[in-house]
């Protein structure tokens, strides 16, 4: 499902109205009806406060008021005199007048105090102040109203987007409504899925308001769906052996960091490939071997510090010839010798490669590693690694995640997995946003698990872009299933691995 900017949504609305001849007031009626259905499903008490701005977002609020007023004890608050309303919003405001449903203009004396009193006793607040038409920081009058809404003890339902959130970036435009639920129309807006906006939206529902289907695709950013992942996963035919599902080679670990190799190898095995080779410095190998019985371990020459020695390259070369994918990085040292090894791998290896953790920091030191590379690459940076790769700051990456993911994809000519809440997968043509996963994953080792899953899916023959999407989705889903029984605070990376199987079962089910 596509995720759109305000301008893209306005264009969709325009084309629905002008090309398909669906009157705007019909779309507004549909939007209002979807909101009414959502309110009825919430089953809240009768005292409903509708706060409506001057644009079409307010118009949606008027439709809600009309449909609910016979059944509820409802008050409507506007931000301007009726003479300032236009178009479909004015049509709906005039219907309220005709029905003698009282509307109070908040610009009148004492109206804000009256609203505050009403909010204190409300069962539900409908936030129809500002939608995709917000163009600037909210002015002080709107900011006052938003603060009153946020002070109300009642739950808040946002119409289309919480007022004051930028639909394009998710940034708070001075002040923003903190909603418990958001019903957004036709397609999710970027600001509902990028943080901090995503944290203001509460539970998100996407409502069909009758926009013609051909208008809903091709916007450059899409939400990963279970259906998409299910249909991309490799099949599991009956007449097969371990060779059918490919071998994955993992270059990971260093003294004190054996766990990273162990976690990646275990995740790779759960990911479904036929064989996993875990190549580590030789002093680390016994630990990995004792932890992951199903992996074939490969002890590699190491230096005094327990880090890889350059003489490991021929051994690796021999091994990768029998494999279908390679991952480099979890727990790997970031010294000169490892850099030399990585350069050798990139110059020679033709397998699809996942670069993670240590390998990403080496790449940041020497971006030329990409120049002569032989294979498609997936980079899996967290914001810190992304900042190093782009030579910028973490806060810059975090406030412009979409842009950062795209820039990495272009600069390094790779599929990019930018980790964090709502991980992004950037490919040449499109960016995907993932909504599975939870804050329990913000702990050591969860990135190693993702790398294991990735290399496993690549070994099964998936393309870098499909593998990246599926791994990110399943990784988050496994963590979501894990927190059904484990507290987010207590979740560890091993719990994610233990739930990969359930994530597969859930995803495969819809494919049958
Ligand atoms: N045909 C359509 O275009 C449809 C639009 N719909 C609704 O319409 C909304 C978009 O409507 P509009 O484009 O009229 O925009 P909005 O209703 O979001 O807001 C526009 C109004 O807010 C004012 N405004 C903008 N930024 C402000 C700020 N920072 N502080 C104070 N006032 C500010 C503008 O001057 C304008 O009066 C959507 O979010 C959706 O809820 C739905 O009814 C479905 C159909
Ligand atoms: K709103």
Image (spheres, rainbow, N blue to C red):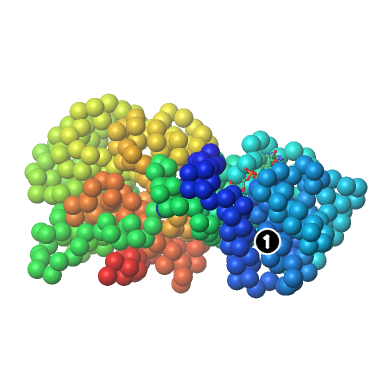
Left or right: 506 as drawn, with respect to 172: left
Q: Is residue 263 visible?
A: no
Q: Which residue is mark 1?
A: 64
Compared with 100, 472 (above or below) is above
Residue 173 quadrant: top right
What residue lies at 10% left-to-right and 65% top-to-bottom? 240
What residue lies at 26% left-to-right and 40% top-to-bottom? 377
Left or right: 104 as drawn, with respect to 500: right
Compared with 258, 490 (above or below) is below
Label 1 C-beta lies within 8 Å of the nearest ligand 1 atom: no
What residue lies at 50% left-to-right and 37% top-to-bottom? 400
What x and y, as percent, mark residue 474? 35, 59
Q: Nearer the viewer, residue 358 or 55?
A: 55
Compared with 104, 362 (above or below) is above
Q: Residue furthest front?
A: 21
| Ligand 1 picture quarter | top right
């Amino acid at each position: 499902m596509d995720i759109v900017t305000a301008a893209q949504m306005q264009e969709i609305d325009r084309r629905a109205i002008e090309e398909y001849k669906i009157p705007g007031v019909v779309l507004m009626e549909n939007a209002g009806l979807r909101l009414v259905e959502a309110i009825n499903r919430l089953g809240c008490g009768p005292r409903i406060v509708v706060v409506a701005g001057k644009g079409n977002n307010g118009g949606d609020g008027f439709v809600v008021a009309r449909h609910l007023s016979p059944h509820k004890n409802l008050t409507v608050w506007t931000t301007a005199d009726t003479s300032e309303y236009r178009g479909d919003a004015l049509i709906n405001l005039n219907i309220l007048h005709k029905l003698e449903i009282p509307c109070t203009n908040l610009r009148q004396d004492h109206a804000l105090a009256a609203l505050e009193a009403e909010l204190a006793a409300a069962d539900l607040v409908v936030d129809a102040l500002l939608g995709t038409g917000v163009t600037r920081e909210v002015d002080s009058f709107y900011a006052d109203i938003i603060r009153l809404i946020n002070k109300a003890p009642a739950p808040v339902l946002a119409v289309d987007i919480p007022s004051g959130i930028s639909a394009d970036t998710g940034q708070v435009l001075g002040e923003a409504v903190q909603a418990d639920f958001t019903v957004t129309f036709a397609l999710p807006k970027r600001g509902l899925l990028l943080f901090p906006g995503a944290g203001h939206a509460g539970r998100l529902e996407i409502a069909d308001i009758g926009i013609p289907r051909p208008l809903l695709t091709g916007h450059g950013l899409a939400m990963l769906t279970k259906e998409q992942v299910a249909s991309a996963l490799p099949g599991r035919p009956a007449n097969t052996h371990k060779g059918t599902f490919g071998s994955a080679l993992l270059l990971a670990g260093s003294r004190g960091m054996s766990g990273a190799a162990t976690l990646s190898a275990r995740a790779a095995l759960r990911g479904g490939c036929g064989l996993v080779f875990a190549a580590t410095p030789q002093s680390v190998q016994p630990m990995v071997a004792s932890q992951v019985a199903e992996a074939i371990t490969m002890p590699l020459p190491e230096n005094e510090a327990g880090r890889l020695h350059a003489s490991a390259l021929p051994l690796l070369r021999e091994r990768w010839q029998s494999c279908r994918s390679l991952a480099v990085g979890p727990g790997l040292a970031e010294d000169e010798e490892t850099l030399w090894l990585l350069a050798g791998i990139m110059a020679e290896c033709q397998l699809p490669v996942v670069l993670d953790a240590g390998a990403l920091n080496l790449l940041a030191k020497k971006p030329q590693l990409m120049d002569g590379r032989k294979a498609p690459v997936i980079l899996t940076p967290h914001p810190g690694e992304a900042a190093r790769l782009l030579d910028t700051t973490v806060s810059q990456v975090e406030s412009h995640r979409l842009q950062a993911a795209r820039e990495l994809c272009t600069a390094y000519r790779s599929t990019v997995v930018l980790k964090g809440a709502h991980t992004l997968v950037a490919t040449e043509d499109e960016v995907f946003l993932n909504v599975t996963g939870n804050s329990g994953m913000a702990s050591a080792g969860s990135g190693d698990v993702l790398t294991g899953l990735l290399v496993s899916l690549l070994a099964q023959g998936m393309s870098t872009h499909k593998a990246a999407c599926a791994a990110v989705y399943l990784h988050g889903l496994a963590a979501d299933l894990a927190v059904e029984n484990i507290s987010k605070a207590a979740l560890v990376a091993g719990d994610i691995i233990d739930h990969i199987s359930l994530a597969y079962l859930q995803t495969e089910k819809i494919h049958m």
